[in-house]
Image (tube, rainbow, N blue to C red):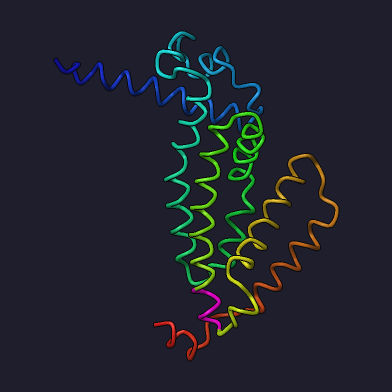
Amino acid sequence: MAAPRKARSADNGARLRLIAATATIMRDEGYAAATSRRVAAEAGVKQALVYYYFPSMDDLFLEVLRAGTEVSLNRIRDALAADDPLTALWTLNSDLRMTALNTEFMALANHRKAIRAELKSIAERVRDIETAAVTVALRARGIDLQAAPPVAVSMLIAQTARSLCNEEAVGVTLGHDELREFVEHQLRTLGAPSPEAAHSVD
């Protein structure tokens, strides 16, 4: 017999609160702070419910990772569909909120094989999306893809932005303004797609 609709809704609500609470703790305090007791308190539920919904903390961490994946991928796709995907890629990866949680999962992946495998899969999907968008942008600007491989360009933009965020998170900002200005100048010099190149892409 199916559970009453209200019961199912309450059940799912508690599970989602646990996922959201874990993400908040990881982002604000680090993954080591995300214990079952701390997560339960943040979610406003009993500690036993953590293991009712998730066999282990690794299972909970995986759900946190997966819960944000599709949202993030859709956000990336939408941003990179803009007129200037190169600048959009730079802006996306310069968002401290986006990089903070990812940094915690990278650290966690050093100790958890399941997290590492899931993170690898997600990272490869993101790189594919970013590379495809950069490929279109470079072609539209008439840039030689042999001289400027799209995957290399996308990685330079994204990894530079993320590196700045990681340093800023620990208070290192020396040279940041100069590097940001340099990168943004390079992105501006690419300009808008030329009519001829844009037409050839179509």
Position of residue 35 relative to residue 94, above or below, is above
Look at the image and give the residue range highlighted in magenta.
136-141
Residue 63 in picture, x, y percent from top left: 45, 31
| Number of callouts | 0
Please tell me which residue lies in front, 201 or 190.
201
**Side of 54 where 157 appears, left or right:** right
Q: Quadrant of the C terminus?
A: bottom left
Q: Residue at x 84, y 57 (%)?
A: 175
Q: Quadrant of the N terminus?
A: top left
Q: Residue at x 53, y 20 (%)?
A: 57
Determine which quarter of the picture holds residue 134: bottom right
Magenta stretch holds residue 56: no
Magenta stretch holds residue 138: yes
Residue 46 in picture, x, y percent from top left: 46, 8
**Side of 3 where 112 appears, left or right:** right
Residue 151 in picture, x, y percent from top left: 59, 65
Position of residue 141 relative to residue 11, above or below, is below
Q: Residue at x 55, y 82 (%)?
A: 141
Residue 4 in picture, x, y percent from top left: 18, 16
Please tell me which residue lies in front, 90 or 144.
144
Determine which quarter of the picture holds residue 145: bottom right
Q: Residue furthest right?
A: 174
Dominant secondary structure of the residues highlighted in magenta in the image: helix
Q: Residue at x 65, y 72 (%)?
A: 187
Q: Residue furthest bottom?
A: 196
